[in-house]
């Protein structure tokens, strides 16, 4: 199985998304997958111009020649596309959204009805058959991920692909300041990568266990308030 993993965190290897990506890819690799990882914060990818030449003139080639071409060739040759993104303003990061928009060139101008009877495009070329979502967010509640998961699922359908699952761990700020709290979950994430690479996939029970919040809102507020104190002291020191 060939896997393309993209980390859309603006903080790249400094962030919690990177830790989730590292554990998941370690598991994918030990399950036998051939994995390529890219950090979008190191790449130069411009937003889609909306010219639609890819759809109407160039049969699937984008007219913007930038690092997106590295991703195009990997997307065309991968079986699984792992979208690693923290929640920014209730959805994927702008860096990741640009990548998804630029995948518009996979679509041809011809239309079809999908299995739900909705109007969708035919394709110039196909995205990986399976998608997977790996995410984290600051707030401790799992509901924070709902808009992101809805967007992710809509994209899976737009590309006529399938979802291999989602791992969304809330409470990032506390998990970054107290990293021991996430150690066990990282082990589970690694194991789930292995299950996916081996073709076994994630059961509903495993997904529920993986995605349950690590901290209650009260625990989160207690831990986050230590960070707030640090911020207040910093601000006071700067104004002295
Ligand atoms: C611009 C911006 C917007 C954010 N919006 C949200 C949000 O809507 N909900 C939330 O829970 N966290 C939000 N966060 C917090 C991030 O999800 C959190 O800090 C996460 O750890 C960032 O990922 P990273 O550690 O990989 O950098 C936001 C952070 C930034 C920088």
Image (tube, grey):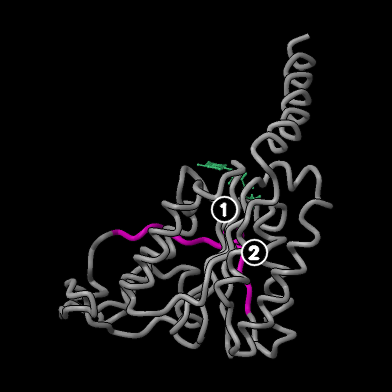
In reply to whether residue 181 is colored magenta, the answer given is no
The furthest residue to the front: 205
Respond yes or no on whether mark 1 lies under 8 Å from ligand 1. yes
Judged from the image, the secondary structure of the residue bearing numbered disc 2 is: helix
Q: Nearer the viewer, mark 2 or mark 1?
A: 2
Residue 37: x and y in percent read: 63, 73
Q: Residue 86 bears which disc, if any?
A: 1
Left or right: 187 with respect to 128? Answer: right
Query: Hey, which quadrant is residue 171 in on the image?
Result: top right
Residue 221: x and y in percent read: 68, 32
Q: Which part of the image, by quadrant, shows the C terminus? A: top right
Image point 76% across, 23% down: which residue? 229
Proximity of marks 2 and 1: CB atoms separated by less than 8 Å: no
Region in magenta:
36-49
Left or right: 22 with respect to 131? Answer: right
In the image, 79 versus 10, the foreground residue is: 79
In reply to whether residue 43 is colored magenta, the answer given is yes
Q: Tell me the distance, in whole angstroms, between the alpha carbons under discs 2 and 1.
A: 16 Å
Say above or below: 86 vs 23.
above
Q: Which residue is mark 2?
A: 210
In the image, 225 versus 11, the foreground residue is: 225
């Amino acid at each position: 199985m060939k896997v393309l993993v993209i980390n859309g965190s603006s903080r790249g290897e400094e962030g919690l998304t990177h830790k989730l990506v590292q554990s998941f890819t370690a598991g994918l690799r030990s399950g036998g997958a051939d994995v390529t990882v890219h950090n979008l914060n190191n790449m130069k990818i411009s937003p889609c111009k909306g010219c639609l030449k890819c759809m109407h003139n160039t049969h699937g080639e984008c007219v913007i020649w930038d690092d997106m071409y590295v991703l195009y060739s990997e997307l065309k040759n991968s079986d699984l596309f792992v979208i690693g993104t923290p929640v920014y303003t209730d959805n994927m990061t702008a860096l990741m959204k640009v990548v998804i928009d630029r995948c518009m060139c996979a679509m041809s101008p011809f239309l079809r009805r999908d299995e739900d009877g909705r109007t969708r495009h035919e394709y110039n070329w196909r995205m990986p058959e399976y998608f997977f979502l790996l995410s984290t967010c600051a707030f401790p509640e799992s509901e924070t991920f709902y808009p992101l998961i809805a967007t992710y699922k809509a994209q899976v359908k737009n590309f006529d692909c399938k979802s291999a699952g989602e791992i969304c761990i809330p409470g990032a700020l506390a998990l970054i300041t107290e990293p021991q709290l996430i150690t066990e979950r990282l082990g589970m994430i690694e194991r789930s990568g292995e299950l996916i690479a081996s073709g076994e996939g994630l059961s509903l029970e495993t997904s529920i266990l993986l995605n349950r919040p690590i901290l209650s809102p009260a625990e989160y507020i207690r831990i986050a308030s230590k960070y707030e104190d640090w911020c207040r002291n910093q601000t006071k020191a700067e104004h002295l």
